[in-house]
Amino acid sequence: MSDRLELTNKKPLRTFSKPADIATIGKLPPQALELEEAVLGALMLEKAPLNDVIDIIHRPEIFYKDSHKIIYESIQELFSASESIDILTVTQKLRSKGELDQVGGAYYISQLTNRVASAAHAEAHARILVQKFILRELIRISVK
């Protein structure tokens, strides 16, 4: 049995599922915004974790925060095109798609890299994000 946690039904990009909201379940859905920021920052700082993290987080929907989904989608697009991934290229990609302001601007993108000292634990953080996504999906399905 594989050590990797994989989700089998891959959806096309930009079909973000609506997380169960606070009113539906009475509390904040499972999420880890600090880890989301750390993973995004790590991907823009170092090339080493890219392949592993993209294998683990193969859909933007795994991120809880909408702006993080959009940023990650741009990172995936750059990765698929074999382009460099750093603060400048991600910012430019978002700008070219007209989404830079929607995610908080260039300043927010640069702040993501300040939230992580190294990319050493990016893969472990990515796995936690997948676990949080699965919990949100279980809650969403159970409240239908």
Image (spheres, rainbow, N blue to C red):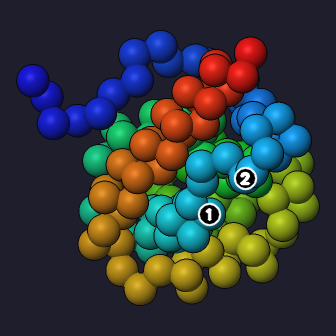
Amino acid type at mark 1: Leu
Which quadrant of the figure contains the N terminus?
top left
Please state which of residues 22 and 84 is positioned toward the viewer in this rendering.
22
**Measured along the vertical axis of the image, is residue 13 above or below residue 4?**
above
Q: Give the secondary structure at mark 2.
A: loop
Residue at left offset 79%, top offset 45%:
26
Query: What is the C-alpha distance between the residues marked 1 and 2?
Result: 12 Å
Which quadrant of the figure contains the C terminus?
top right
Residue 18 relative to residue 41: left or right: right
Residue 74 relative to residue 132: left or right: right
The residue at which mark 2 appears reads as 28
**Measured along the vertical axis of the image, is residue 53 above or below residue 19?**
below
Instruction: Let me know if residue 81 appears in the view.
Output: no
Q: Residue 102, percent across and down?
A: 88, 55
Q: Residue 111, percent across and down?
A: 66, 81
Amino acid type at mark 2: Leu
Residue at left offset 76%, top offset 38%:
25
Please state which of residues 35 and 117 is positioned toward the viewer in this rendering.
35
First in residue order: circle 1 vs circle 2: 2
The residue at which mark 1 appears reads as 33
Residue at left offset 35%, top offset 72%:
119
Q: Quadrant of residue 109?
A: bottom right
Residue 9 relative to residue 19: left or right: left
Instruction: Let me know if residue 63 appears in the view.
Output: yes
Mark drawn on residue 105: none
Direction front: furthest residue: 26
Please state which of residues 39 and 32 is positioned toward the viewer in this rendering.
32
- Choose mark 1 or mark 2, whichever is in front: 2
**Measured along the vertical axis of the image, is residue 47 above or below residue 144?**
below
Q: Residues within 10 Å of mark 1 (few under 14, many from 20)?
A: some
Residue 131 relative to residue 100: left or right: left
